[in-house]
């Protein structure tokens, strides 16, 4: 009953602020699919094009966020294993997370878990932290104002609101656009594509290491007839498709989640975004789990001989 009263009170206060005091956003916040450049190493930012380099190497907000995540991951490992003999508190939580993922990996492939788990576990923690960083208040909403030139478009008059009078706000009258200092690393397609590419490379590596040249038979099978040759070509194509699948699944879910939160916050910034925020926390966790589990399963499948030959030989030996 108290929770219901508190929610209703918050909605009433929010409605009064939104409609009564005009505390609303003056214009829909800019949404950029690509990561924005903060500075350009060896060059300069493009004039009138926020977040774009005219020359040089772009240092993007997602790259800066990735460095932050790497530091957090290093601190997580340091504080999570420093009391190895007497685990307690935070170390117990870290051990619970890692041991749960390790137990699952053992259930998938007990024989090769020692080879697979270092990458799978690291990828899980990296993606999880990257996803959660994007949900921290201020990430994506605190940044620098850069002037945007729109040639050949009709100038739109935007009514000022309460937020325009606050300090450190971008001026809509001067056509300034916000370029956030930080952006979720997994909301950058370059990051997810790199993770997907690395995963597929390791999958092929473990397959070749376990089976040798016999591993290539599943892709170039000319011994069992034309049908298996076609199946092998499809298998080869599916290996490349996995890169796209890994990259776009992770990027699409995280980026779409950020857009949903922006839209809900723009429509009614009081209480309405909370259910969507909770859902995005769940999505952030599930996407890290899905990436880690799929990588683990594909690695296990790569080490199995085509047609189960190795399993049949081991069974015959026993």
Image: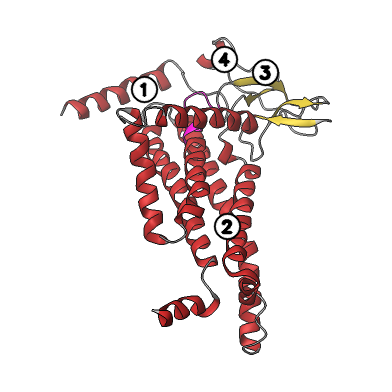
Dot 2 or dot 1, earlier in sequence? 1
Mark 1: secondary structure: helix
Gap between marks 3 and 4, in whole Å?
10 Å
Residue 164 - label: 4
Q: Are marks 2 and 1 in contact (CB under 8 Å)?
A: no
Which residue is located at x 52 percent, y 45 percent? 123
Which residue has dot 1 on it?
Answer: 14
Residue 53 visible in the picture? no
Dot 3 or dot 4, earlier in sequence? 4
Dot 4 or dot 2, earlier in sequence? 4
As drawn, which residue projects farthest toward the left? 1
Q: Position of residue 215 (x, y in %)?
A: 61, 71
Dot 2 or dot 3, earlier in sequence? 3
Gap between marks 4 and 2, in whole Å?
42 Å
Secondary structure that dominates the magenta span: loop
The image quadrant of residue 111 is bottom left
Front residue of 68/286: it is 68
- In the image, is residue 143 above or below residue 263? above
- Left or right: 231 in relation to 87: right
Badge 3 crowding class, 10 Å Cα cut-off, few under 14, some 14 to 19, many 20 or more, is few
- In the image, is residue 167 above or below residue 317? above
Which residue has dot 3 on it?
Answer: 173
- Tell me the magenta residue range: 132-140
Q: Are marks 1 and 4 in contact (CB under 8 Å)?
A: no
Badge 1 crowding class, 10 Å Cα cut-off, few under 14, some 14 to 19, many 20 or more, is some
Q: Position of residue 102 (x, y in %)?
A: 39, 49
Magenta stretch holds residue 136: yes
């Amino acid at each position: 009953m108290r929770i219901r009263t508190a929610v209703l009170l918050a909605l009433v206060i929010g409605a009064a602020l939104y409609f009564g005091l005009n505390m609303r956003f003056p214009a829909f916040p800019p949404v950029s699919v690509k990561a924005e450049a903060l500075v350009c190493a060896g060059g300069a930012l493009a004039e009138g094009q926020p977040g774009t380099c005219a020359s040089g190497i772009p240092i993007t907000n997602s790259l800066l966020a990735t460095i932050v995540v790497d530091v957090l991951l290093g601190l997580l490992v340091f504080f999570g294993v420093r009391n190895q003999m007497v685990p307690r508190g935070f170390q117990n939580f870290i051990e619970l997370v890692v041991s749960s993922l390790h137990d699952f990996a053992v259930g998938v492939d007990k024989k090769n878990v020692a080879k697979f788990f270092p990458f799978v576990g690291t990828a899980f923690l990296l993606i999880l932290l990257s996803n959660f960083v994007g949900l921290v208040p201020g990430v994506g909403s605190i940044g620098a104002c850069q002037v945007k030139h729109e040639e050949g478009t009709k100038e739109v008059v935007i009514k000022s609101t309460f937020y325009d009078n606050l300090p450190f706000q971008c001026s809509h009258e001067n056509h300034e656009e916000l370029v956030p200092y930080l952006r979720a690393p997994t909301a950058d397609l370059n990051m997810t594509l790199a993770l997907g590419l690395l995963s597929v490379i390791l999958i092929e590596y473990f397959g070749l290491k376990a089976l040798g040249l016999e591993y290539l038979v599943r892709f170039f099978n000319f011994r069992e007839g034309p049908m298996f040759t076609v199946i092998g070509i499809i298998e080869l194509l599916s290996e490349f498709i996995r890169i796209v699948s890994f990259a776009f699944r992770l990027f699409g879910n995280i980026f779409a989640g950020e857009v949903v939160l922006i839209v809900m916050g723009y429509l009614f910034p009081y209480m309405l975004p909370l259910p969507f925020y909770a859902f995005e926390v769940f999505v952030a966790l599930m996407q890290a789990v899905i990436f880690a589990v799929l990588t683990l399963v594909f690695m296990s499948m790569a080490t199995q001989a085509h047609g189960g030959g190795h399993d049949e030989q081991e069974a015959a030996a026993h």
